[in-house]
Image (cartoon, helix red, strand yellow):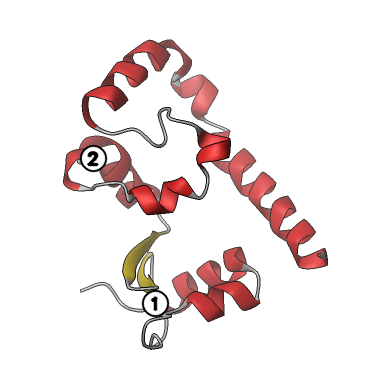
Amino acid sequence: HIPCGEPPLPILGHALTLMKGNVFRTFMDWSRKHGDLVRFHAFGTVYILCNNTTDAKRVLGTNMNSYKKDPSTYSVFSCLLGNGLITSEGERWHAIRRKLAPVFKLEILSDVGSAAAMVTRLLFQELDKA
């Protein structure tokens, strides 16, 4: 059982909560209150917030075939993400991943998480100003 961040509203789920404040801060609050895996809802879709490296590695690497990407979620970002590694699945994902394998060295990736977190924090700070 994965705990829910708070009771969801009918149809909207947690969408209003996510839209009214800093999403990153909301996710961090939910993780502190409910643990590293938190379930939330938005417009009839269930999402799982994963806030630890062990589970993230399981989903993104070792057990990725058990988890399908939601095309509607990625379609919002298609102008930025295109049709590459992040949005692809199955054989297309494997083909792209093989081509990019030399880039995915541990030395190169060791700072990606902290860099992504820093950029995300800066983005949310700018969004909070808007």
- Quadrant of the frame with the C terminus: bottom right
Which residue occupies 51% across, 68% down?
Answer: 27
Residue 45, placed above or below residue 50:
below
What percent of the width, then of the height, locates residue 28? 54, 68
Q: How many marks?
A: 2
Residue 105, placed above or below residue 38:
above
45 left or right, relative to 82: left
| Amino acid beneath label 2 | Met
Residue 62, placed above or below residue 119:
above
Marked residue nearer the N-terminal end (1 or 2): 1
As drawn, which residue projects farthest toward the left? 66
The residues tagged by marks 1 and 2 sit, at their Cα atoms, a distance apart of 24 Å
Towards the viewer: 79 or 49: 79
What percent of the width, then of the height, locates residue 102? 43, 11
- SS of the residue at dot 1? helix
Which residue occupies 35% across, 47% down?
Answer: 71
What percent of the width, then of the height, locates residue 122? 74, 52
Image quarter of residue 39? bottom left
- Closest to the camera, between mark 1 and mark 2, is 2
Image quarter of residue 13? bottom left
The label on residue 34 is 1
